[in-house]
Amino acid sequence: MTPSIAVIGLGYVGLPVAVGMARAHGRVVGFDIDQARVAALRDGHDATGEFEPSELAGLDLRYSADPADLRGCSCFILTVPTPIDADRQPDLTPLRRACGTVGAVLAEGSMVVVESTVYPGVTEEVCGPLLAQASGLRQGVDFTLGYSPERINPGDRTHRLETIAKVVAAADPTTLARLVRIYGPVVAAGLHVAPSIKVAETAKV
Protein backbone atom coordinates (compact mmCIF):
# COMPACT_ATOMS: atom_id res chain seq x y z
CA MET A 1 0.00 0.00 0.00
CA THR A 2 1.29 3.46 -0.87
CA PRO A 3 2.15 5.36 2.30
CA SER A 4 0.39 8.59 3.04
CA ILE A 5 2.69 11.47 2.16
CA ALA A 6 3.23 14.82 3.84
CA VAL A 7 4.95 17.74 2.13
CA ILE A 8 6.34 20.30 4.56
CA GLY A 9 6.46 23.77 3.01
CA LEU A 10 4.10 24.84 0.21
CA GLY A 11 6.15 27.43 -1.65
CA TYR A 12 7.28 27.30 -5.27
CA VAL A 13 9.03 23.97 -4.58
CA GLY A 14 6.67 22.29 -2.14
CA LEU A 15 3.37 22.90 -3.89
CA PRO A 16 4.42 21.24 -7.17
CA VAL A 17 5.73 18.28 -5.15
CA ALA A 18 2.47 18.03 -3.20
CA VAL A 19 0.38 18.27 -6.35
CA GLY A 20 2.53 15.73 -8.18
CA MET A 21 2.34 13.30 -5.29
CA ALA A 22 -1.42 13.74 -4.99
CA ARG A 23 -1.89 13.08 -8.69
CA ALA A 24 0.25 9.95 -8.58
CA HIS A 25 -0.61 8.54 -5.18
CA GLY A 26 -3.37 10.49 -3.41
CA ARG A 27 -3.55 10.84 0.38
CA VAL A 28 -1.22 13.82 0.62
CA VAL A 29 -1.06 16.39 3.41
CA GLY A 30 0.40 19.74 2.37
CA PHE A 31 1.66 21.57 5.46
CA ASP A 32 2.78 25.17 5.83
CA ILE A 33 3.14 27.45 8.85
CA ASP A 34 1.71 30.36 6.82
CA GLN A 35 -1.99 30.18 7.62
CA ALA A 36 -2.88 32.72 4.91
CA ARG A 37 -1.10 30.57 2.32
CA VAL A 38 -2.99 27.49 3.48
CA ALA A 39 -6.33 29.32 3.42
CA ALA A 40 -5.69 30.59 -0.12
CA LEU A 41 -4.78 27.11 -1.37
CA ARG A 42 -7.93 25.70 0.18
CA ASP A 43 -9.81 28.25 -1.92
CA GLY A 44 -7.93 27.11 -5.01
CA HIS A 45 -5.66 30.14 -5.29
CA ASP A 46 -1.92 29.75 -5.72
CA ALA A 47 -0.17 33.09 -5.16
CA THR A 48 3.05 31.77 -6.75
CA GLY A 49 1.26 31.38 -10.08
CA GLU A 50 2.48 27.83 -10.60
CA PHE A 51 -1.05 26.39 -10.77
CA GLU A 52 -4.44 27.52 -12.01
CA PRO A 53 -7.47 26.81 -9.78
CA SER A 54 -8.57 24.08 -12.19
CA GLU A 55 -5.25 22.30 -11.68
CA LEU A 56 -5.72 22.21 -7.92
CA ALA A 57 -9.32 21.03 -8.01
CA GLY A 58 -10.26 17.45 -7.24
CA LEU A 59 -6.94 16.34 -5.76
CA ASP A 60 -6.68 14.13 -2.69
CA LEU A 61 -4.55 16.87 -1.12
CA ARG A 62 -5.31 18.31 2.30
CA TYR A 63 -3.82 21.70 3.11
CA SER A 64 -3.06 22.36 6.77
CA ALA A 65 -1.18 24.62 9.18
CA ASP A 66 -1.86 22.25 12.08
CA PRO A 67 1.02 19.85 12.85
CA ALA A 68 -1.48 17.38 14.31
CA ASP A 69 -2.69 16.70 10.76
CA LEU A 70 0.71 15.17 9.98
CA ARG A 71 0.08 12.23 12.30
CA GLY A 72 -0.41 8.98 10.44
CA CYS A 73 1.81 9.93 7.53
CA SER A 74 4.78 7.69 6.85
CA CYS A 75 6.67 9.71 4.23
CA PHE A 76 7.65 13.30 4.97
CA ILE A 77 9.15 15.50 2.26
CA LEU A 78 10.82 18.68 3.52
CA THR A 79 10.74 21.52 0.98
CA VAL A 80 11.39 24.52 3.21
CA PRO A 81 13.72 27.36 2.14
CA THR A 82 17.39 27.52 3.10
CA PRO A 83 18.37 31.18 2.67
CA ILE A 84 21.75 32.71 3.42
CA ASP A 85 22.31 35.09 6.31
CA ALA A 86 24.04 38.48 6.41
CA ASP A 87 27.43 36.74 6.43
CA ARG A 88 26.43 34.70 3.36
CA GLN A 89 26.28 31.53 5.44
CA PRO A 90 23.42 29.03 4.99
CA ASP A 91 20.57 29.64 7.43
CA LEU A 92 19.22 26.24 8.42
CA THR A 93 16.63 27.68 10.81
CA PRO A 94 13.58 26.80 8.66
CA LEU A 95 14.92 23.29 8.09
CA ARG A 96 15.67 22.79 11.78
CA ARG A 97 12.14 23.90 12.66
CA ALA A 98 10.67 21.58 10.07
CA CYS A 99 12.62 18.69 11.59
CA GLY A 100 11.21 19.56 15.01
CA THR A 101 7.68 19.64 13.63
CA VAL A 102 8.04 16.32 11.84
CA GLY A 103 9.93 14.70 14.70
CA ALA A 104 7.03 15.36 17.03
CA VAL A 105 4.74 13.19 14.88
CA LEU A 106 7.27 10.72 13.48
CA ALA A 107 6.35 7.04 13.81
CA GLU A 108 8.45 3.91 13.46
CA GLY A 109 8.97 2.90 9.85
CA SER A 110 8.72 6.44 8.51
CA MET A 111 10.92 7.97 5.83
CA VAL A 112 11.99 11.62 5.80
CA VAL A 113 13.17 13.09 2.50
CA VAL A 114 14.92 16.45 2.31
CA GLU A 115 14.52 18.49 -0.89
CA SER A 116 15.85 21.77 0.50
CA THR A 117 19.20 22.97 -0.83
CA VAL A 118 21.85 22.09 1.76
CA TYR A 119 25.57 21.58 1.96
CA PRO A 120 26.88 17.99 2.06
CA GLY A 121 26.21 16.26 5.36
CA VAL A 122 23.19 18.23 6.52
CA THR A 123 20.59 15.53 5.89
CA GLU A 124 22.34 12.83 7.90
CA GLU A 125 24.34 14.91 10.39
CA VAL A 126 21.89 17.73 11.18
CA CYS A 127 18.38 16.64 10.18
CA GLY A 128 18.74 13.03 11.34
CA PRO A 129 19.80 13.86 14.91
CA LEU A 130 17.15 16.59 15.19
CA LEU A 131 14.45 14.16 14.09
CA ALA A 132 15.74 11.54 16.53
CA GLN A 133 15.79 14.02 19.39
CA ALA A 134 12.25 15.25 18.72
CA SER A 135 10.80 11.79 18.18
CA GLY A 136 12.77 9.61 20.57
CA LEU A 137 13.34 7.24 17.65
CA ARG A 138 16.63 5.90 16.29
CA GLN A 139 17.99 7.27 13.04
CA GLY A 140 18.56 4.49 10.53
CA VAL A 141 16.66 1.99 12.65
CA ASP A 142 13.23 3.36 13.49
CA PHE A 143 13.15 5.95 10.71
CA THR A 144 15.22 6.45 7.57
CA LEU A 145 16.44 9.34 5.46
CA GLY A 146 16.49 10.27 1.81
CA TYR A 147 17.52 13.28 -0.25
CA SER A 148 16.22 14.56 -3.57
CA PRO A 149 17.37 18.06 -4.50
CA GLU A 150 14.68 20.34 -5.87
CA ARG A 151 15.21 21.57 -9.44
CA ILE A 152 12.15 23.80 -9.84
CA ASN A 153 12.51 26.91 -12.01
CA PRO A 154 9.84 29.34 -10.71
CA GLY A 155 7.46 30.57 -13.37
CA ASP A 156 8.70 28.13 -16.01
CA ARG A 157 5.65 26.38 -17.46
CA THR A 158 7.77 24.08 -19.66
CA HIS A 159 10.51 22.75 -17.38
CA ARG A 160 8.50 21.47 -14.45
CA LEU A 161 8.82 18.83 -11.73
CA GLU A 162 7.63 16.06 -14.02
CA THR A 163 9.77 17.04 -17.01
CA ILE A 164 13.19 17.39 -15.34
CA ALA A 165 15.17 14.25 -14.43
CA LYS A 166 15.23 13.99 -10.64
CA VAL A 167 18.17 12.96 -8.50
CA VAL A 168 17.33 10.65 -5.59
CA ALA A 169 19.47 9.14 -2.85
CA ALA A 170 18.90 7.33 0.42
CA ALA A 171 20.74 6.10 3.47
CA ASP A 172 20.15 2.44 2.63
CA PRO A 173 18.90 0.26 -0.26
CA THR A 174 15.45 -0.37 1.23
CA THR A 175 14.78 3.34 1.66
CA LEU A 176 16.08 4.00 -1.85
CA ALA A 177 13.58 1.49 -3.24
CA ARG A 178 10.78 3.29 -1.37
CA LEU A 179 11.99 6.61 -2.71
CA VAL A 180 11.97 5.31 -6.28
CA ARG A 181 8.43 3.96 -5.86
CA ILE A 182 7.21 7.31 -4.59
CA TYR A 183 8.97 9.64 -7.04
CA GLY A 184 8.98 7.37 -10.08
CA PRO A 185 5.31 7.82 -11.05
CA VAL A 186 5.60 11.59 -10.54
CA VAL A 187 8.64 12.38 -12.68
CA ALA A 188 8.06 11.38 -16.31
CA ALA A 189 11.61 12.44 -17.20
CA GLY A 190 12.95 9.69 -14.96
CA LEU A 191 15.13 9.39 -11.88
CA HIS A 192 18.89 9.43 -11.47
CA VAL A 193 20.02 7.38 -8.48
CA ALA A 194 23.00 8.91 -6.70
CA PRO A 195 25.34 6.57 -4.79
CA SER A 196 24.85 8.37 -1.48
CA ILE A 197 22.99 11.24 0.16
CA LYS A 198 26.16 13.33 0.34
CA VAL A 199 26.75 12.88 -3.37
CA ALA A 200 23.20 14.08 -4.09
CA GLU A 201 23.65 17.05 -1.75
CA THR A 202 26.92 17.91 -3.51
CA ALA A 203 25.27 17.64 -6.93
CA LYS A 204 22.74 20.28 -5.93
CA VAL A 205 25.37 22.63 -4.53
Image (cartoon, grey):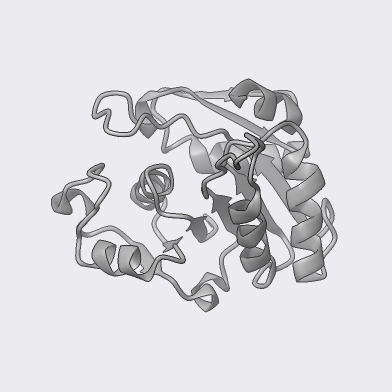
Q: Residue at x 62, y 46 (%)?
A: 113
Q: Residue at x 32, y 24 (%)?
A: 159
Residue 29 lies, in percent from the top left, at 44, 63
- Give the image quarter of residue 194: top right
Q: Residue at x 33, y 30 (%)?
A: 160
Left or right: residue 138 versus residue 164 is: right
Q: Residue at x 16, y 47 (%)?
A: 52
Residue 44 lies, in percent from the top left, at 20, 60
Q: Is residue 146 above or below residue 98?
A: above
Pick the front one: 170 or 40: 40
Pick the front one: 28 or 204: 204
Q: Is residue 195 above or below residue 183?
A: above
Q: How many marks?
A: 0
Q: Quadrant of the N terminus?
A: bottom right
Q: Quadrant of the C terminus?
A: top right
In this view, the residue farthest toward the front is 86
Left or right: residue 36 versus residue 151 is: left
Residue 79 lies, in percent from the top left, at 51, 47
Residue 115 lies, in percent from the top left, at 56, 41
Left or right: residue 38 versus residue 70 is: left
Pick the front one: 189 or 131: 131
- Give the image quarter of residue 136: bottom right
